[in-house]
Amino acid sequence: MMNDNRKTPARRLPLAMRLAGIIILTAALHVRAQTTAPNPAAVDDYLYAQKLYQEGYHELCVSQLEAFLQRYPDAAELADGWRLLGQASLALRRYAAAEQALRQFDMRYPLHPGHAEALLLLAESQKLQRKFQEAALTCQRLVYFHPRSEQAPLAAYQAGELFLQAGEMEAGRTSLYEMMDKYAASPLRLQAHLLLVQSFMQSNDYQRGLQEAERLFRIFPASELSVQAYFVRARLQEALGQFQLAEEGYRTLLQRYPKGEWSRRARLQLSEIVFARGEVNGALTELAAIEADAPAAAELNVVALRAAAMNLTIGRTPAAAEALKKFESSLADSTSRLTYFYMQGSLAEQAGNAAAARAAYQQACALPASFEPQTAAVAAPAFLRQRSFWRNAQLAYAAQDYTAAQQVCRQYRREYPNGEFRAALLLLEADIQRQGLHNPAHAQKLYFDLLEDYPASAQVDEAQFGLAESFAAAGERQMARLQWQRFLQLYAASELAPAAGRQLRLLTEFEPSTAPETMRQLTETVLQLSSNPGAEPAALALARLHFQRRDFEAAMRSSRAALAAGLAAGAQREATYLLGVSCYQLAERERLAGRQAPAWRDSADAALQSLLSEGTADRFAAHANELLIRLALPDEAAAAPALLERVDLLLSNAAEAAGLDDLRLWAAVARKQLAAPADSVAARQIVLALQRVAAAENPDYRNQALWELADWQAKQKNWDAARKTLELLRQSPRHDVAQARGQLLLARSLRRQAEYDAALAELAALQERFFYCAYADSARQERLNVLIAAGRWQEALRAMEETREAADDYAGSDGLDLQRGKLQEASGDYGPAIHAYLRFLEQHPHAPEAPAALLAAAKLTRQVGAEGLAAAYFEECRRRFPQSPESEQAQLQLAALRYDQGEFSEALGLAVAFMQERPDSPLFREAMKKSILCLYKTKNVTRAEAEAKAFRERFRDDRESLADFQYAAGELALQEKNFLQAEEIFKKLGRDYRGSDAGILGDYGLGKALLIQNKTKEALETLTAIPGRYPKHPFLPTVYLGLGDFYLANQQWDNAIEAFNQVVEDSTFDNNYKVGVRSLIDVYDRIGLKDRALALARHYVNRFPEDSKVFDLRMKIALLLNDLQQYDDAIALLRRLKPAADATTEPEVQYYIGKSHMNAGRFESAIAELLRVKFFSKPTKLPWDVIALYDAAICYTRLGNCTRARQLFQRIVREQGAASEFGRFANTKIAELGNCPEAN
């Protein structure tokens, strides 16, 4: 059987041979075209088309070329014609036609001299059609077939760029790497490297991107680096959290390029970094610098929005409004305009300018919905456009512009069928129909839609209430009654529940009955009285019947008629009773309707009092007494003792009556208010009364009774009983206000008992059950308290952020800024904490907590290392709140700050001024102590001892301060090198305070004095005994630092490491911690553990970016990198450090740049960098210029250039002298160069 898959002879030809054949054939055609005899007509037509193209008549040019190509298929100018047709089509933006023409040129004339240029044009046409992958492949073909053409570097670069645009990151990066390797001399190489770095940024691979950026800085000299390179590297450092390095990078960029687009972008990012650490004013200063650089309108808009947002973050609404005035909306993009209009509307609304707010919100609503940000920004919440609809509709409704409000609501529903605020606007539209446009039928439909579509919305209770109101307004009383009943069944905890209950009572208890049965009874009574007039007084019978029908006005009239007719005694009392009860019911009806009814109340009181005055004890008198008490309840104080006695008497006479639960509950609550703390009888009465009401299972009062009982038990500290009562209340089927309050109280009780998980579960159940009312908000707040009590700071902060995102307006308007600041401070998030404190201060400048907020912000600012700003805050606290306790603390904090900075004279002045201004302050002792310590530090011994004596006489119980004075005196003696006196002072200090915490000062001071006197054995015995004698003492880190310094000086490396590690473990990022870490770095460096030293140094720099030692530590990192032979990284770091160096340190930085090149074996580069120290750096105390000159001569020696080396060594001898140390070394090297062969 034959094999059908066998290859034909044509298919057996190798692919390469077939391609070669095609190329040969095409070349032959090209040669034929070139050797074809010129056709004058064809030449004229082509030149005419070319002229048309050059003059800009591209449409005519295309027509001419198309005719030319058809008319002269064998013309010599055919190739140029196809290429020109592609160019003209490109000019006309006919990209597909251009691609077709250029493809024809590519396929027909691959050997044409303009082939490379045509391929570049072909790639451009494909790119403009967004065929990025095809365009990239075209560029790659150009590079492959024309690698030495002048278009090749650009094509290689564009191939990488196009692959990246097509989303093929690896292919794009590969192309860029190949371009940089193959065309290393191309001016596009830097741009290619930058594009490579940006590709890593786009894929969020910031670490690799930063590595490439650092490599870029190593490869290219500083003179060739662009401003974009500096910006991209700093941006990557910022993305990786290396904020100090990023800030240095941005500032370096600004030094080199103070003006321009990239400089403005750098300032914008720099403002964000400064803002993040709490320096709002510093951030605003950077934004102001951008404005001064005359940016484009779009940039100015960004600056305006950010300045407004930053001001809003700390509550400066006037400054935010002023910043927004610089926003030019006509030149902004839609997203920026949306933010601008919303912020403008919110600020106008806060300022009370409703008309301006509505105008701004309307402009926001007019923008396209696609530009709405779905996440919260720095100062504005999410869904800005939807919020604009909501606020616009609310303001229109408040202004009674119901038609406009309705239009906004309907537009929102059309544009956002599932919007975030659909339920709220649906409710608003229904309210507009019911209250504004008086269309209850339409309102009912909208209310029904809300209840059906959004049953879990917070607006459901308002919708149900409005639905019942709309039925009542339409006269549908039966439906209204059903809706009121449904409201009280489902939403009994709502703030609207009391109003709903009143409306239901009006419908069920005070509307005259029109039922057929009652009408029949009325008819029969009238007929019976007419047929038998002597049977019973007609008026009394009618009064009784009208009262049964709830027609109280008719009953009142009939009762008065009966009384006027003259009746027997028994009938007279019944008529009086019916008159009083009817007037009482009419008064109650008016009260429920919210109207005053003094006439009805007075009539009821008179009639009922007349029944009691007769002294007859019958059913009329008993009920009259109850009604008189009920009449008194609204007017008299709830806890009036006289009224309580009347209620008690009534309840005692009707102990078994079932309809008096409300009075029993009232009496128990009143007794709670009047009971003395130790009144056990009253306590028993309260408990029994509440238990009886709760046991009666009356749904109207049972939950309230259980709540009052639990509240009483909690106040009596009977937590177990209270918890059991609250458990019963939680299980009640009626979900009303009392149950919600009970669950909240139960959660608080669980929090107090540290049962945090149970409390959170209870609060979650409360939020789920009562989602529609204010108790859900109370549950959220209590959940926050539980999380804080449990120490779960991050969860608490997330809960606050959820509250902020749910808020209607800008960040911080939820009223939790002070608490948010405390939480962020507790969790170590100092920058946002400072923002929160400042925001609270701006929004509540006169609040009682304002001084504490400013003082807390100042302390945190000092803690993050911004000591200058902290001092300014302390000064502001003294100025703004001069009479507050916080002002006193601020002055002492400022004195402590100056003391720690070594400015003892200024600290002394502050402390003395405090003592003079506030002699009665509780902080006087602290101020006096600080002043005495400053006197010792300034070597004013006589005055210090006199003040210390006065301190001792005034504060005899403060022995610790006296110990501090003795220690300060001993340290001063050591400074004066009076060792024996110091030793005696420390010995006495140790003896006087032996066994107390202050004794450690004497032992440590003695050990230090002995060490200075080289009494090593005794010193070590004293110092090493301290940790065992004073375990966990706060002064121990200082002791370990002293021990570590001793071990370090004596090269006892392990002991030194152990001592310094103890400091680090026992300290919490204070000054001792910093000193301990720096000492460990020194030890590890000296014993050769360079990698450990490097890791610790980097940790220090990242942890304390504002510390004064950061520059020295960065220098240390550079030297360690050098020791670890990571020369390129060392050079890159040193170059970044150089702009921040002053005249004293710049020569050292420059020297080590050259030294790193020298160590790396790059002697030419090393010589260039080293000689910069000699010729460009300023002279310093340390002879960096001489050292650099010496090392440069060594480099010349290594290169074999003995003549130049000898010249440099001779220069050192001339300048330093032959007798100097450098001169002797240089002469030695000159002697060694005697037989040095010159390099070829």
Image (tube, rainbow, N blue to C red):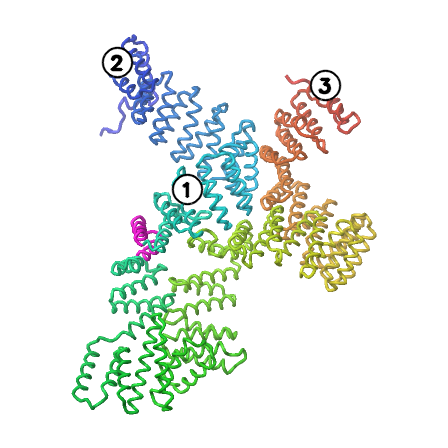
- Pick the residue in front: 187 or 618: 618
What amino acid type is highlighted by mark number 1? Ser
Dominant SS type (magenta): helix
Q: Which residue is mark 3?
A: 1235
What amino acid type is highlighted by mark number 2? Tyr
What amino acid type is highlighted by mark number 3? Asn
Residue 547 seen in the current view: no
Which quadrant is the C terminus positioned in?
top right
Q: Residues within 10 Å of mark 2 (few under 14, many from 20)?
A: some
Q: How far across and how far down the image is residue 901, in percent? A: 68, 47
Of marks 1 and 2, which one's residue comes earlier in the chain?
A: 2
Q: Residues within 10 Å of mark 1 (few under 14, many from 20)?
A: some
Query: In the image, what residue occupies the spot 46% across and 82% down?
Result: 642
Q: SS for tag 3?
A: loop
Residues rendered magenta in the picture: 402-429
Give the Cα distance between marks 2 and 3. 80 Å
Q: How far across and how far down the image is residue 729, in percent? A: 41, 72
- Magenta stretch holds residue 440: no
Nearest to viewer (mark 2 / mark 3): 2
Q: SS for tag 2?
A: loop
Does 635 appear above or below 953? below
Q: Tell me whether circle 1 and circle 2 mark residues in contact (CB < 8 Å).
A: no
Q: How far across and how far down the image is residue 18, in percent? A: 32, 20
Residue 295 seen in the current view: yes
Does 948 appear above or below 652? above
Of marks 2 and 3, which one's residue comes earlier in the chain?
A: 2
Q: Which residue is mark 2?
A: 72
Nearest to viewer (mark 1 / mark 3): 1
Q: Which residue is mark 1?
A: 336
